[in-house]
Structures are given as structure tokens and as C-alpha cells.
Amino acid sequence: MSSWLGLKPISLVPRCCRTVVNKAALRPVPQTRGRIVSPQDFLKAIGRSADTKVTVESWEDLWSLNRLRMKEAGVEIKDRRYIMWCMGKYRLGEDPAEFAHPPRPQKKIRGHGPAVQNGKRIRSKRRRSGR
């Protein structure tokens, strides 16, 4: 149609839309190394009780997981993001003992900025001009 102008045909699908394809299944499955020989060993090594939140049968099933399948299994957002982050680090060849860390503790003090410090409301000091 527009070939006589030398232009490429325009696609009707927008380029900024997300794909629904499971890209995790397309990546190569990393080899087991060290003391990690099963998916349960990997999930125990990364901590945060991930072994109780995700149940997989084989090593290949673990590496074909994506965020949608974990969401359907009922895994919370923070846990999904942490597990996916750990899987990416393991793919790059790092040991879980180096990158696994516990979650941040909950805030003990609620408040915004310096108005509340150590659980007490801080009042501003007024400067008096005569003293």
C-alpha cells in the first residue's frame, strides 16, 4: 500500500503495551550448584520462609515461574518481588548466602519528619527576644 513511498507498513498494535508471554520460560534454566540441588533447597537458602509460600515439583518448574503464576498461587507482592529478585541473582551466578537478607523491620515510631522523635512529639523552641 505505501511501498511506493518507501515506507514500512504501520502496525495496528501499539508498541507500549505489555506482553502476556511468560518470558521466564524462555530463559535458560541455571544448573544446580553447591548445596542447592532442589527447588526447596533454593527457597530455604533465600530465606523469608519462601519455601512455605511457593510449592514447585521440579527445578524446571521453579525457573518457569513468573509473577502471574505466583499471584495465582496467592503469594504476596513483597514476597513475589523478593523471590524473583533472588532468582535473577542466582541466574547471574551469585550464591544465595551472599545476597539473601531478612525483611526490613516494621517502623516503631509513626509520624512524619522531625515532629516525632523517639515516640515523643517535639515542640519547637521559641526564641524570646528579651532573655
Image (tube, rainbow, N blue to C red):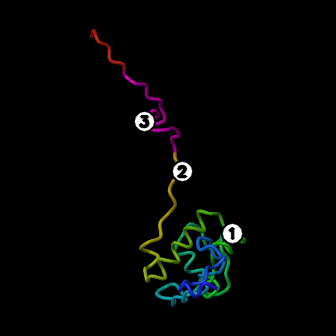
Kind of residue at disc 2: Gln
Q: Which mark is residue 106?
A: 2
Q: Who's the residue at 59% across and 70% down the image? A: 16
Of the residues under marks 3 and 2, which one precedes in the sequence? 2
- Identify the residue under disc 3: 114
Residue 20 vs residue 34, the one in the foreground: 20
The Cα–Cα distance between marks 3 and 2, rounded to whole angstroms, is 18 Å
Crowd class of label 1 (few under 14; some 14 to 19; many from 20; radius 10 Å): few
Look at the magenta stretch and give its main secondary structure: loop
N-terminal-most mark, 3 or 1:
1
Q: Secondary structure at mark 3?
A: helix
- Alpha-carbon span between mark 3 and mark 1: 38 Å
Query: Which image quarter is the N terminus in?
Result: bottom right
User: Would you identify the image quadrant in which residue 52 lies?
Assistant: bottom right
Q: Looking at the image, is 119 positioned above or below residue 18?
A: above
The three-letter code of the residue at mark 1 reads: Lys
Q: Horizontal and vertical percent for residue 6?
A: 53, 86
Q: Which residues are magenta?
A: 108-125
